[in-house]
């Protein structure tokens, strides 16, 4: 009874093309953003910011970038960690080498570096697809690992490849406290997610989805596969590069090439698969699942084991986390292969009819 569209008439094309055409959705998103901006900074603890909220926001943004390439354009990529690394080290070099470089332009320039890198390794998508393309993007991961570890210019000649940043500020506001870091990440994520949502529901987004569904038919009706695929690589790599720069500057502070290993690529791909491919909201669901579940398991597993009189060591808890986490992923993909976003959509459809089953 509370999620009905009765009486919500569209009298213009602009009203019909809104991101959230249903009034209840607009109110829910507005309340969620108000809660995130105005309530969370005053009630959340420092641990909650640093261990959960900040990495959740950063990985959500990275998952949005991966979803554009994998979910909307259908191009399988295993090089997301490489794009994050290029964004992080690119932003670092601009930030350190140019005196007085502000943080936000450095992040944008890092994203542009990742975009160029993504276009370069996206060129094989014009000839290969599927697993062959996945192997090609995996080569980007190995190349970036070698590049940032062996070419000392990118790390200002540090022997280990480890770099760090400090005294970050935006418009004169220092980014030292966890609250300021959280708010900065939240603003970046909201703005870039809004831009991504407008892209995928526009003409370029329809081209991506046409290429995903059947590239030969898309070419027949006049869509240029080269432009569509490379634009998807460019936009995806830019968003992932900005997320990588945020991860390095805001969350880590000091990092090395191992921070952007192939594990990050698989983690981002799992976020998109679990959250739902071809759904921006699914990126946030997948990021929440991957980020929060391991922390929850590490907190509750010892307590649950103690109820049965079992003492679990730290190594045992870690191994149990991996087994339960992997089992949940497999079970979830069997139950709902279209991801959490599909479950969310089904729930909304049922709410439209509730309490009438017909």
Image: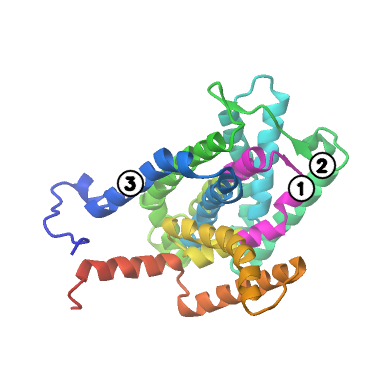
Q: Residues within 10 Å of mark 2 (few under 14, many from 20)?
A: some
Asked whether 248 falls inside the magenta stretch, the response is: yes
Residue 168 position in % (x across, y down): 63, 28
Magenta stretch mostly in which secondary structure? helix
Q: Secondary structure at mark 3?
A: helix
Tell me if residue 316 comes above or below residue 142 in the rendering: below
Residue 193 located within the stretch drawn in magenta:
no
Q: Which badge, 2 or 3, comes first in the chain's sequence?
A: 3
Please provide percent x and percent y for residue 124: 63, 58
Q: Residues within 10 Å of mark 1 (few under 14, many from 20)?
A: many
**Which mark is first along the chain, 3 or 1?**
3
**Rendered location of residue 240, percent (x, y):** 58, 48
Q: Which residue is mark 2?
A: 161
In the image, 256 versus 120, the foreground residue is: 256
**Residue 22 visible in the displayed image:** no
* Residue at image mark 1: 257
Q: Which residue is mark 3?
A: 31
For marks 2 and 3, give the one nearer the viewer.
Answer: 3
């Amino acid at each position: 009874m509370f999620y009905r569209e009765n009486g919500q008439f569209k009298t213009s094309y602009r009203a019909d093309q809104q991101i959230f055409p249903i009034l209840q959705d607009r109110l829910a998103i507005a309340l969620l953003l108000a809660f995130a901006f105005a309530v969370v900074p005053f009630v959340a603890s420092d641990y909650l910011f640093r261990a959960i909220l900040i990495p959740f926001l950063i990985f959500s943004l990275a998952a949005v970038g991966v979803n554009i390439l994998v979910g909307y354009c259908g191009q399988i990529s295993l090089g997301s960690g490489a794009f994050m690394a290029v964004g992080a080290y690119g932003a670092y070099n601009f930030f350190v080498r140019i005196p007085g470089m502000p943080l936000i332009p450095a992040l944008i320039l890092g994203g542009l570096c990742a975009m160029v890198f993504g276009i370069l390794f996206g060129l094989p998508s014009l000839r290969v697809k599927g697993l062959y393309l996945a192997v090609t993007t995996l080569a980007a991961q190995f190349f970036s690992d070698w590049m940032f570890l062996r070419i000392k210019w990118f790390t200002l000649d540090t022997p280990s490849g480890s770099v760090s940043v400090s005294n970050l500020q935006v418009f004169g506001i220092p980014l030292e406290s966890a609250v300021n870091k959280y708010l900065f990440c939240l603003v970046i994520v909201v703005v870039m997610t809004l831009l991504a949502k407008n892209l995928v529901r526009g003409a370029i987004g329809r081209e991506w989805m046409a290429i995903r569904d059947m590239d030969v038919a898309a070419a027949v009706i006049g869509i240029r596969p080269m432009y569509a695929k490379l634009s998807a690589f460019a936009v995806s790599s830019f968003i992932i590069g900005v997320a990588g720069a945020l991860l390095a500057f805001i969350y880590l502070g000091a990092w090395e090439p191992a921070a952007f290993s192939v594990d990050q690529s698989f983690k981002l791909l799992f976020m998109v698969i679990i959250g739902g491919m071809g759904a921006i909201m699914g990126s946030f669901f997948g990021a929440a699942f991957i980020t929060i579940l391991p922390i929850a398991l590490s907190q509750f597993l010892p307590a649950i084991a103690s109820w049965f009189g079992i003492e679990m060591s730290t190594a045992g808890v870690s191994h149990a986390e991996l087994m339960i986490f992997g089992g949940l992923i497999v079970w979830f993909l069997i139950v709902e292969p279209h991801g959490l976003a599909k479950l969310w959509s089904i729930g909304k459809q049922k709410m439209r009819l509730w309490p009438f089953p017909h």
